[in-house]
């Protein structure tokens, strides 16, 4: 069951960003910690280092530490992050520290800043204007 979420992130100047996603699976483990599992199909299995550096998993850990309701609201060390490769029936897991989550927040804010600076080609097609998932960032009406 997918668990949708939205979390607020702030840069050092206090400029906010709300960002969301969907977690494939959340298990509450016997010791009260949680495991967030992201299912992968048709993917090459990454190295442990690649999993340890995976920004998507860091983002899920940010969600698990920032969402106040159960089963979330955990400390970073209480969140196990796993990629499960369905084709190979293999799981690779990792955890994040508070410092790693701070760095991930900075990286996500940096990506937002790069997106804001970019020159995207805008479409004036009516379908795009009414249904674009990037409408909050779109400058088509400028």
Image: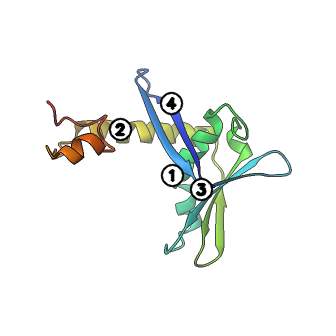
Q: Identify the residue at image location x=43%, y=20%.
A: 14
Q: CA distance from mark 2 to mark 1?
A: 15 Å
User: Are the residues at dot 2 and dot 3 in contact (C-beta closer than 8 Å)?
Assistant: no
3 or 4: tag closer to the N-terminus: 4
Q: Nearer the viewer, residue 105 or 6?
A: 6
Q: Nearer the viewer, mark 1 or mark 3?
A: 3
Q: CA distance from mark 2 to mark 4?
A: 13 Å
Name the N-terminal-most of marks 2 and 3: 3
- Is disc 4 placed on a helix, strand or loop? strand
The mark lying in front, picked from 2 and 3, is 3
Instruction: Assess disc 2: are there few (<14), some (14-19) or many (≥20) residues with their C-alpha within 10 Å of its C-alpha.
Output: few
Whether pointer 1 and pointer 4 mark residues with C-beta atoms closer than 8 Å, the reply is no
Return the residue nearer the eye: 78 or 27. Answer: 27
- Residue designated by label 1: 56
Q: Residue 8: which numbered mark, if any?
A: 4
Task: Locate the N terminus and report the quarter of the image it occupies.
Answer: bottom right
| Residue at mark 2 | 112
Q: Label 2: state its secondary structure.
A: helix
Q: Is residue 32 left or right of residue 9?
A: right
């Amino acid at each position: 069951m997918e668990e949708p979420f939205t979390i607020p992130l702030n840069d050092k100047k206090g400029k906010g960003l709300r960002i969301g996603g969907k977690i494939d699976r959340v298990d509450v483990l016997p010791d009260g910690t949680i495991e967030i599992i992201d299912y992968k199909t048709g993917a090459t299995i990454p190295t442990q280092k690649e999993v340890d550096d995976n920004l998507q998993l860091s983002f899920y850990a940010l969600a698990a530490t920032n969402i106040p309701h159960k089963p979330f609201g955990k400390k970073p060390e209480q969140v196990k992050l796993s990629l499960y490769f369905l084709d190979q029936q293999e799981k690779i897991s990792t955890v994040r520290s508070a410092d790693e989550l701070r760095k991930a927040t900075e990286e996500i804010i940096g990506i937002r800043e790069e997106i804001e600076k970019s020159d995207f080609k805008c479409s004036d097609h009516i379908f795009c204007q009414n249904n674009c998932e990037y409408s909050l960032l779109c400058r088509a009406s400028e």
